Image (cartoon, helix red, strand yellow):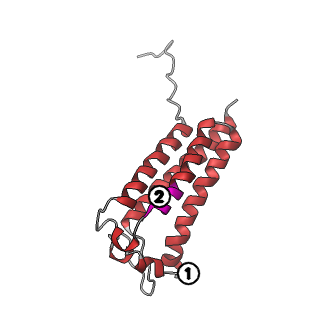
Amino acid sequence: MSLRGATAVPAPRIDWTRLSIGLALLMLVYFTITNHVDLYPLNNLGPAGPQWPSTLAGWIQFVIFIALMATRRRLAVLAALVIAVVWISLQFRQWYFPYLFNIGPVDWYFHHGYADTLKVLPPIPGHAVTPDLQHNLLQLLSLSVAAAAIMAVRQSFWRA
């Protein structure tokens, strides 16, 4: 069978900016739900008290992220990427420095009830902090946002 004369159908092009925005919205919805809906043992809202400051901090950052991405301007998209990288970096510092390297304060972990939540990572002997499932999922979503933002930056610099 000959394919002469047949034209190749181009692969659909991913709109990384749109995907970044969608993932940021998904992450914010998850973040808001886990900050305000008692889903114990996934989260433990009792000891932590009101989560409005945390929720507002996340929303403010990612509303700015979304607004910057929506402009599709090169430098704005790059600035949005910086927001996503700072966000995931702060999560890494909070959770993985104490978990992997036993570095940093750990009183927040017990004070806010994270010691009583679901874990999928194994505890490390002698290290007080083990990241919980609630935050593992948030970090996965956060990494997804950052990865899509990296691709959006690449896409914005490549387009004519």
Give above or below for 53 relative to 26: below
* Quarter of the rendering occupied by the N terminus: top left
Residue 146 seen from this side: no
Find residue 58 and report its horizontal and vertical position in percent. 51, 56
Q: Quadrant of the C terminus?
A: top right
Residue 50 coordinates in the image, percent (x, y) = 41, 65
Residue that mark 1 sits on: 103
- Is residue 57 a member of the stretch shown in magenta? yes
Amino acid type for the residue under numbered disc 1: Ile
Residue in view at x 49 percent, y 15 percent: 6
Q: Residues within 10 Å of mark 1 (few under 14, many from 20)?
A: some
Q: Quadrant of residue 121?
A: bottom left
- What residue range appears in magenta? 51-58
**Can you tell which mark lies on residue 55?**
2
In the displayed structure, does residue 111 sit left or right of residue 68? left
Residue displayed at 44% across by 15% down: 2
| Residue 144 visible in the shown view | yes
Q: Main secondary structure of the magenta part?
A: helix
